[in-house]
Image: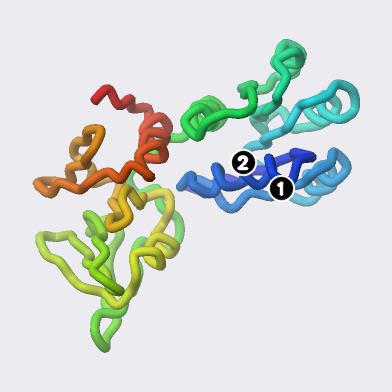
Amino acid sequence: MNLQKCLIVDDSAKAGTELRDYITQLPFFLPPDVCHSVTEALGLLRQKSYNLVCLDMHRPGLNGFDLIGSFSKHVPVIVTSTNAEYAVDSFDLGIVDYVLKPFTFLRFTRAINRALSVRLTPGSQTGYPFIFLKTGHTFQRFDYTDIDYVQAYGIYCKIAGQQKVVAVNDTISNLENVLPRQQFLRVHKSYIVNLSKITSYSYRSISVGSHQIPLGAAYRERFQGFLGLLGKKSDA
C-alpha cells in the first residue's frame, strides 16, 4: 500500500498539533503537512498532491467554503469544527465527513475510513520487504512476513516468528519507528505485533497463533481504531 499524504488546515496551532498526532498514529500515512491559513494551504496545494485534506471550519466566507471549492474532486475532505451550523453547506460541497470538536481518536478513524476506504491487504508494504537488525556482532535479515511479534527484553528485543525467537540489539521504541507502520502496531509497552498475524483478540489480549499478547490500556483505543479501519468491530 502506498502511504497516504494528508494536509491539515487549522488556524489553531494546538488543534493542528493534536490532529497531526492522530494522523501520525495511523500506519497508512506519512507525517502530514500542517498549515494555519487559507493562503498557506493554497500555496501547498499548488506544490503538492494530497490524498486527504482535514479542514477546520469555524466561520463562513472565504476562510473555508471557497477553499473546499478549490480542491480537486478526487481529494476527500474531512471538516472539523466546534460549530454544527456549517455542516449542511459543507456536505453540499462534497465533503466526506463533518466532525465536531472535541472528538476522539475512534471518531476520527471512522472519518478516515469514510474518506479513504483504507483496507490492509497482503503484500501491501512499500519499499524492501525486509530489514537487517543487529544480533550480537552480526546483522541478520528479517523478512517482515516472517515476523509474528516483537517483545521487549530489557534494552534488547526478541523477534518471534518461523517457530523461533531471536534476540536483537535494539530497543522496542526504536523498532516501533523503523518497522513499517502499515504492517506493525505497538499494542503494549512490551509488544509490537504484525497485524497480518493476529488470529483473535479480546478486550485485554491479542492472540498471535498460540501466543497470548496483553493489550495495554494505553494502546487499546488506538488498536480499536485500527479495527475500524480494517472493517472489523470489537464486541468483546
Q: CA distance from mark 1 to mark 2?
A: 9 Å
Which residue appears at 22% of the width and 59% of the height?
A: 146
Give coordinates of residue 177: x percent, y percent.
44, 62
Give coordinates of residue 201: x percent, y percent.
22, 36
Q: Is residue 216 above or below residue 144?
A: above
Count every numbered label the image shows and give the total. 2
From the viewer's perspective, is 185 left or right of 71? left
Viewer-proximal residue among 105 and 233: 105
Which of the labelled discs sits on residue 19, or is there none?
2
Which residue appears at 22% of the width and 41% of the height?
A: 206
From the viewer's perspective, is 217 left or right of 200? right
Please state which of the two labelled residues, at mark 1 or mark 2, is closer to the viewer.
2
Give coordinates of residue 218: x percent, y percent.
38, 44
Viewer-proximal residue among 223 and 127: 223
Contact check, label 1 and label 2, Cβ < 8 Å: yes
The image quarter in which residue 41 lies? top right
| Quarter of the image where the C terminus is located | top left
Helix, strand, or loop for circle 2? helix
Residue under circle 1? Answer: 34
Badge 1 amino acid: Val
Give coordinates of residue 224: x percent, y percent.
37, 34
Which residue appears at 64% of the width and 21% of the height?
A: 98
Q: Is residue 123 above or below residue 222?
A: below
Evaluate whether residue 107 shows in this view. yes
In the rendered image, the residue lying farthest to the front is 217
Helix, strand, or loop for circle 1? strand
Q: Is residue 145 above or below residue 203?
A: below
Which residue appears at 26% of the width and 77% of the height?
A: 140
From the viewer's perspective, is 46 left or right of 212? right
From the viewer's perspective, is 145 left or right of 76? left
For marks 1 and 2, the one nearer the N-term is: 2
Badge 2 amino acid: Leu
